[in-house]
Amino acid sequence: MKFRKFLAAGAGAALAFSLAACSGGGAGSTSDSSASGDDGAMMEEGGTIGVAMPTQTSSRWIADGDAVKSGLEDQGFDVDLQYAADDIPTQSQQIDNMITNGVKALIIAAIDGTALSSQLQAAADAGIPVISYDRLIRDSENVDFYVTFDNYNVGVQQATSLLVGLGILEADGTTETGEEGPFNVELFAGSLDDNNAHFFWAGAIDTLQPYIDSGVLVVPSGQTDIEQAATLRWQQETAQKRMEDLLTGNYVGTDEKVNGVLSPYDGLSRGIITALQNNGYSGTVEDGFPVVTGQDAEVESVKLIVDGVQYATIFKDTRKLAEQAVVAATAYLNGEEPEANDTETYDNGVKVVPSYLLESDIVYADNVQELLIDSGYWTQEQVDKGVA
Ligand code: BGC
C-alpha cells in the first residue's frame, strides 16, 4: 500500500517499471522490518534512500548527485546524499552510517570498486537493496543492480574522436581518409581501482591498436600498458605531471612533437592541456595544438572545445543515468526486479550483475549546440563562461 502513491506520482513515460503488481511493502527491501531511521511523514510514506557519491571536485558527480536526489524526492523519498572527497574510509563510513540509520535502499558510486564488501554484507543482512551507480562494485555478491553507460563503447568513442581529430578518419568516425601519418600520440587511462577505467581503456586500445601496428600512430614514450598510463583517483594534477614528464623525457630537445593525446576524462584533459601549454604548445587544434580527447562534457571543457583547444569529449547524460537509478530503487521498494537490458557484460568477480546500460555521444565543437545546449544540459551562458 505504502508505495502506491509514489508509483502513481511517478507513472510518467520515464518510469519503465510496471505498475501492475503494486501490492504492498517491497520484497526486495526490508519493508516493515526494523529499519526505523528518521521520523516524520515522509519516512512513513517512502523512507530514506542513501546516495553515496565519490567527489565534488568534478562537476559531473555534482550533477549526478543533484539529479538522483531530486528524482528520488519526486517519488516521495527522503534522500541522504553524501560526497566522500575521493577518500575511501570516508565513503565506507558514510555507507555504514546510512545502513545504521535504516535507509531503504543504497545507490553507490564507489571510489574504490573493491573496498566496500563489508558494507555491502551489512546492507544485505539488513535486506537493503544496493544499486551500483555508474561504477561497478566488485568482489561482492551483494550488488543487486548496476546502472551505467556502455563503457567499452565510451572508450571506442574516445579513440574515434582522436582518429577524427588527427584526420585518420572522416567526421563520420568510420571512413578512413587514407592519411598515414605518422602521428605521435600519448595515452592516458583512469584510476585502476575504478572498473570503468579498464572498459574505457579496452575500447580505446582495441580501436587504436591497428593504427599503432601499422605505424600510422606512434607512441614515443612506449607507455602503452594501462598500468603505465593510469591516473590514480582520476586527478588532474597527476595527469598534468605525467604529461610534463612525458614531454621532458621524450620530446623536449628533439624534433618530435605531440600530435594527439588519448584522455579518458575532461579533468585529466585540462591537466594535459596545461602541461602542453607550459611546454610551448599554443593556439587551437586548427593551428596545430595537439588533439586531446575527454569524457563527461564538463562545462570547463565544453568551453575549451568551443574555443578549439580541447578537441572532443564524450557526453554521458547524467540526467538519464539518475533516472534509471531512481527507476531501479523504486522497483525494489515495490517488490519488483528492475528491468535490465544487459545481463552479460558486467561480471564483478563474483557474479554478473544485471545492468541497465545507456548510450553516449561524441561531442565536437560543431555539435555542442545540439547535444548540450538544445537538450538543456548546459546553458549558452554557462558554456560561454565555462562555469556551471
Ligand atoms: C566515470 C567517468 C568519470 C570518471 C572520473 C568514471 O567512473 O564513468 O564518467 O570521468 O569516473 O570521475
Image: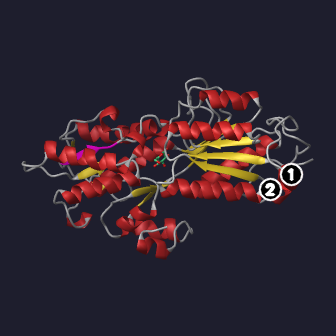
Q: Which residues are magenta?
A: 183-188
Residue in the picture at 77% in, 44% down:
331
- The residue at the far top in this view is 350
Label 2: which secondary element: loop
Question: Could you say where residue 289 lies in the image, as x and y percent from the top left?
Answer: 22, 61
Q: What is the number of the mark on residue 45?
A: 1
Residue in the picture at 81% in, 38% down:
35
Q: Is residue 232 magenta?
A: no
Is residue 354 toward the left or the right of residue 56 in the image?
right
| Corner quadrant of residue 125 | top right
Q: Badge 1, how many Cα within 10 Å: few under 14, some, many 20+?
A: some
| Corner quadrant of residue 165 | bottom left
Residue type, mark 1 in image: Glu
98 up-or-down from 363: above or below: above
296 up-or-down from 344: above or below: below
34 up-or-down from 379: above or below: above
- Would you say the magenta stretch is mainly helix, strand or loop? strand
Residue in the picture at 24% in, 66% down:
286
Mark 1 Cβ and ligand 1 under 8 Å apart: no
Viewer-proximal residue, 339 or 41? Answer: 41
Identify residue for label 2: 76
Label 1: which secondary element: helix
Residue type, mark 2 in image: Gly
Q: Is residue 215 visible?
A: yes
Question: Could you say where residue 338 lies in the image, as x and y percent from the top left?
Answer: 73, 41
Is residue 7 toward the left or the right of residue 83 in the image?
right
Give the Cα separation between the discs numbered 1 and 2. 7 Å
Is residue 54 toward the left or the right of residue 218 in the image?
right
